[in-house]
Image: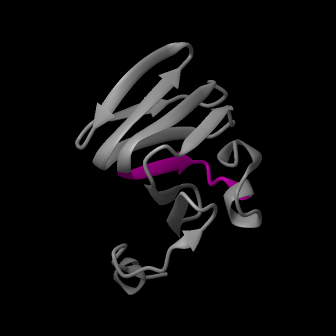
Amino acid sequence: MAVLDNVTNTKTMPDQQLTEAMSRRMVVGKNQMLTIWRMKKDAHSSAHSHPEEQIFWILSGAIEFEIEGKRRRLHAGDCGVIPGNVTHEAWVIEDVEMANIFSPVRNDYLNQGALDYMKK
């Protein structure tokens, strides 16, 4: 598989609408995936954990994360790592666009639509 044959522009990818307030676009490789989220103000992702390591990068807007009981407001340009199996929760303060890289690939994202914690 040639690398340049698989280049895409995330701005032209169709959104997968998961809930009224959350949509995503995904680029999936063999060992990792990029997920670009768009979430509306007041969206909430209830406390959850997953075995995959997650790197997040806030592209626009503001969101509050609680990671292992520590809560912090994040804005465009902020980024960090959530280790696998660490409980975290998110509250969208203003419309937000956020990139997440997961390793390994999250099979639940490939096989399911909105997960329960996205609906609460």
Residue 21 placement (x, y as % from top left) = 54, 57
Using residue 20 as the reference point, say whether residue 72 is left or right of it: left
Residue 41 placement (x, y as % from top left) = 43, 48
Residue at image position (55%, 28%) is 83
Q: Is residue 104 magenta?
A: yes
Magenta stretch: helix, strand or loop mostly: strand
Residue 10 placement (x, y as % from top left) = 37, 73
> In the rendered view, would you say 116 is above or below 84?
below
> In the rendered view, would you say 99 is above or below 80?
below
Using residue 63 as the reference point, say whether residue 29 is left or right of it: right
- State which quadrant residue 45 falls in: top right
Residue in front for this viewpoint, 11 or 93: 93
Residue in front for this viewpoint, 93 or 32: 93
The residue positioned farthest toward the bottom in the image shown? 5
Using residue 106 as the reference point, say whether residue 72 is left or right of it: left
Range shown magenta: 96-107
Residue at image position (50%, 74%) is 15
The residue positioned farthest toward the top in the image shown? 69
Residue in front for this viewpoint, 16 or 102: 16
> In the rendered view, would you say 46 is above or below 69?
below
Residue 82 placement (x, y as % from top left) = 50, 30
Residue at image position (48%, 80%) is 14
Q: Is residue 67 magenta?
A: no
- State which quadrant residue 57 falls in: top left
